[in-house]
Amino acid sequence: MRKSGILLHPTSLPGDWGIGELGRWAYRFADFLVESGQQLWQILPLGPAGSGYSPYQAYSSVAFNPMLISLETLAERGWLRPAELGSSPGFAESPVDFARVVPFKRDLLHKAASRFFQNDSDALRTEFDGFCGGQKAWLDPFARFAALKERNKNAAWTQWRVKDANPASVLEQKFIQFEAFREWGLLKRYCNDRGVEIIGDLPIFVAHDSADVWADPDLFDLDAEGRPRFIAGVPPDYFSETGQCWGNPLYRWDVMERSGYRWWIERIQVMLQQVDRIRLDHFRGFEKYWEIPAGSGTAAGGRWVDGPGDRFFEALSQALGELPFIAEDLGYITPEVHALRDRWGFPGMRVLHFAFGDEAADNPHKPFNFIRNCVAYTGTHDNNTTAGWFAGGDRPYAGDEIARAKRYLGADAGDAVWGLIRVLLASVADRAILPMQDVLGLGPGARMNTPATVEGNWRWRMRPSHLDSDIASRLYELNRIYGRLPSK
């Protein structure tokens, strides 16, 4: 049961085309996981990133981000020409420049799709037809949505003037999803065959400007014009004094329950084709969620509303069997949330960055309070890097936190980042996850996301030199010492 892993989103992989892809560097990273004794690869949501390029604001809850498709793979198939790859504007190794990457790759994906359909004898046409048939329930509406969104110059669906989709554009969107699912499926199989599981991430809410809301508006709390009446978020917390307004529409849980939670079951079924375990983001919202009137400037004026609770997980369990979920139970958590998590046996999360804010002996994030059935982290994608955390920055009371952490580490305080990594791997937690930035000892410039901000997030990328054999050996040795290596 004792395992360790790395948190790294595929967009952060190295490569030549401005953003991480599912080509050779993804396989090289999988090899790095094996070399360093890891059995888990945790990622962020895989959907097509929407507002602010956030994977948590995707314009589909099940479709794949086209930006992850490997251009080299498309060229190997003959769907792209070498000269077209050579037309790259020249991307830096890091960070991701979304404003340049997205139009560049979108144009090449259009060319690849055109060549795929021009060649009637392509060996993958039968596989493509099978994919379209097997994924029809979500693929048909998504492909129409994506085609219409492009035809309406990327405007939100409530502002569309053109309502008729070009059939060729719809077919192109299906090809893009087919290729993305195919490439990811091959990579997942490569990982699984080498003893590495994929931990996916399922946002509890979906973006308003998404195929889900456009295709099934009755499932969401919208007004007559299709706009949210209330939006999701969280009250004031560790990350923001005024709370966070996420902007996502809220569900009509009563309508979903009457359908047997069909939409959720189908969503999770597709996701379980992509990953082995699922982190339920904002698990707290299944017990109670924060309802904010649309148009509010801050989240402070919201209120707690009952979520679907046990009835929801009973329906999922009946349809799907054992639920391979991890509960993201961070933030303001009540005993009722803990009880819901524990009734279903879901592991919760522990984060070392939250362990040293006070001297309280009952702080659940202090390693001596960990339980076996949890997933422990140095930090998450929402935290600063551990090196950045130790630097303090403008974090209130950072000096006190850092002093407590170094006292806890004792002899390891000289190399504080790896001292915290050692404490994590030595802990009783069955699963321990390290952000790749922490393994590399990178500072705050490598932070993935700053909650309650929109600009400058989701951009960090590794460099090829980061996949270092000395780092792999160091991690392997710690996994060996603390019993986290795969069993022979």
Image (tube, grey):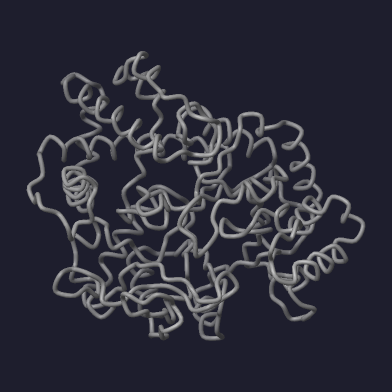
Give the side of residue 480 with respect to residue 138, left or right: right
Rendered-image quadrant of the N terminus: bottom right
**Residue 3 image offset from top left, x and y in percent:** 66, 53
> Is residue 133 visible to us here?
no
**Residue 311 image offset from top left, x and y in percent:** 36, 80
The residue at the point 20 percent across, 41 percent down is 132
349 vs 46: above or below: below
398 vs 17: above or below: below
Rendered-image quadrant of the C terminus: top right
299 vs 10: above or below: below
Residue placed most toward the observer, 33 or 48:
48
**Residue 14 image offset from top left, x and y in percent:** 55, 32
* Residue positioned most to the right: 411
> Is residue 151 visible to us here?
yes
Give the side of residue 56 with respect to residue 334, left or right: left
* Residue positioned most to the left: 164
Residue placed most toward the observer, 81 or 428:
81
Residue placed most toward the observer, 21 or 179:
21
Give the side of residue 399 with respect to residue 351, left or right: right
The residue at the point 26 percent across, 77 percent down is 229
Total marks shown come to 0
